[in-house]
Image (cartoon, helix red, strand yellow):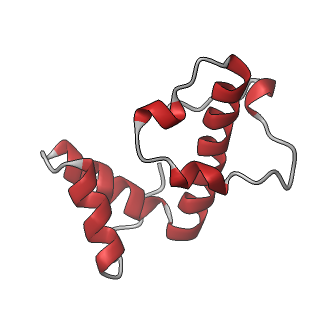
Amino acid sequence: MQVNHRERYNLLKGTDTSYIKQFNATRDFFVPDDKLLTKHYASAKSEVALWVSKVGTGLVFDHLDRMKKGKSFESVWLSSKSKPSNPSSERNR
């Protein structure tokens, strides 16, 4: 994941970013309007940070390891939603 700390990717506190979770296709995210595209990136950054703060880095790195070993994103994500998560280790990277 690219972490971008430029000012334009920082949202005002309290900005609703949950809309980004409703996107089902890349065409929903990638739009020709540069300001809206920047908002999508900033919203996604915020939602991922919120998710990581809830589940911990261990689960994130377990997901990445599974994909590195050939599992698809969809299968890793769907399997984590259907059963309680139990990361093999809590890593601090």
Residue 68 location (% of width, % of height): 20, 43
- Residue at the image point whose x is 78% and y is 25% from the top: 8
Q: Nearer the viewer, residue 34 or 90?
A: 34
Q: Is residue 21 above or below residue 6?
A: below
Q: Where does the image place residue 50, in percent across and percent down from the top left?
A: 63, 59
Q: Quadrant of residue 26?
A: top left
At 49% from the left and 47% from the top, the residue drawn is: 23
Question: x%, y% of residue 64?
Answer: 30, 49
Count every numbered label the image shows and give the total. Answer: 0
Residue lying furthest bottom in this view? 84
- Between residue 52 and residue 14, name the one nearer to us: 14
- The answer to whether residue 60 shows anywhere in this view is yes
- Which of 92/46 is in front? 46
Q: Is residue 88 visible?
A: no
- Residue closest to the eye, 57 or 18: 18
Examine the rendered structure and indicate whether residue 88 appears above or below residue 44: below
Left or right for 87, reference 11: left
Q: Quadrant of residue 82?
A: bottom left
Residue at coordinates 55% horizontally, 61% vertically from top-left?
Answer: 51
Residue 44's place in the image compared with 76, above or below, is above
Examine the rendered structure and indicate whether residue 48 appears above or below residue 39: below
Taking the view exactly as shown, the residue that stands out farthest to the left is 70
Residue appearing at x 73%, y 23% in the figure = 35
Residue 35 as seen in the image, left or right of residue 75:
right
Q: Quadrant of residue 84?
A: bottom left
Q: Say whether residue 11 is left or right of residue 71.
A: right
Q: Is residue 66 left or right of residue 86?
A: left
